[in-house]
Amino acid sequence: QVQLVESGGGLVQAGGSLRLSCAASGRTINNYTMGWFRQAPGKEREFVASINWSGDSTRYAESVKGRLTISRSDARDTVFLQMNSLEPEDTAVYYCARGGWYGGAEVTPAQYVTWGQGTQVTVSS
């Protein structure tokens, strides 16, 4: 089994920062496309950021460009989402997901098969 575990969420004031981490137990996420998605109450799950298998190509939702940064560890076994200049609109449960083997940075949920349980990010005004 592949299990993805997100961590690093919490409550911060607007303008603050958080760093989310996603690590795998069981099968490795090394050399897989990885993505971050988020879902607010009553809303559809939306794309946030993705990174290709090697970590040298990324894609972002327009709403987070310049504020959120996706990266992965040198061993490619952990994925991060550095969140700066947070806004109340960023409040959501954030999920990491694994996509294709040696894949590119994809943007649609259907291209990701394995999902974590999510971590709550709450940004107060």
Image (tube, rainbow, N blue to C red):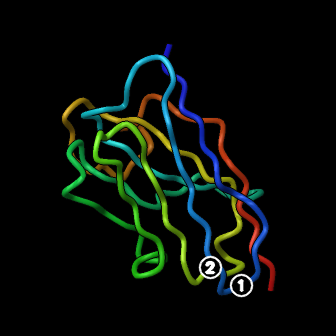
Point out residue 80 in the picture as x, y percentages from the top left corner.
46, 54
Q: Which residue is drawn at the image coordinates 40% and 35% (left, top)? A: 98
* Element type where label 1 sits in the image: loop
Mark number displayed over residue 60: none
In the depicted structure, whether residue 44 falls above or below residue 125: above
Point out residue 50 in the picture as x, y percentages from the top left corner.
36, 54
In the depicted structure, whether residue 6 falls above or below residue 51: above
* Cα gap from disc 1 to disc 2, whole angstroms: 5 Å
Amino acid type, mark 2: Leu
Q: Which residue is drawn at the image coordinates 65% and 36% (left, top)? A: 117
The residue that disc 2 covers is 86
Crowding near pointer 1: few (<14 within 10 Å), some, many (20+)?
some
Compared across the picture, whether 48 is left or right of 44 comes to left
The residue that disc 1 covers is 14
Point out residue 113 in the picture as x, y percentages from the top left corner.
43, 29
Disc on the earlier residue, 1 or 2: 1
* Element type where label 2 sits in the image: loop
Point out residue 19 in the picture as x, y percentages from the top left corner.
56, 62
Q: Which residue is drawn at the image coordinates 48% and 52% (left, top)? A: 36
Outermost residue toward the top?
A: 1
Crowding near pointer 2: few (<14 within 10 Å), some, many (20+)?
many
Q: Which residue is drawn at the image coordinates 65% and 87% (left, top)? A: 15
Amino acid type, mark 1: Ala
In the depicted structure, whether residue 82 falls above or below residue 43: below
Compared across the picture, whether 101 is left or right of 7 comes to left
In the depicted structure, whether residue 55 falls above or below residue 17: above
The quadrant in which residue 116 appears is top right
Outermost residue toward the front?
A: 74
Q: Identify which residue, 116 or 82, lies in the foreground.
A: 82
Compared across the picture, whether 54 is left or right of 29 comes to left
**Do labels 1 and 2 touch, CB within 8 Å?**
yes
Question: Quick one: quadrant of the C terminus?
Answer: bottom right
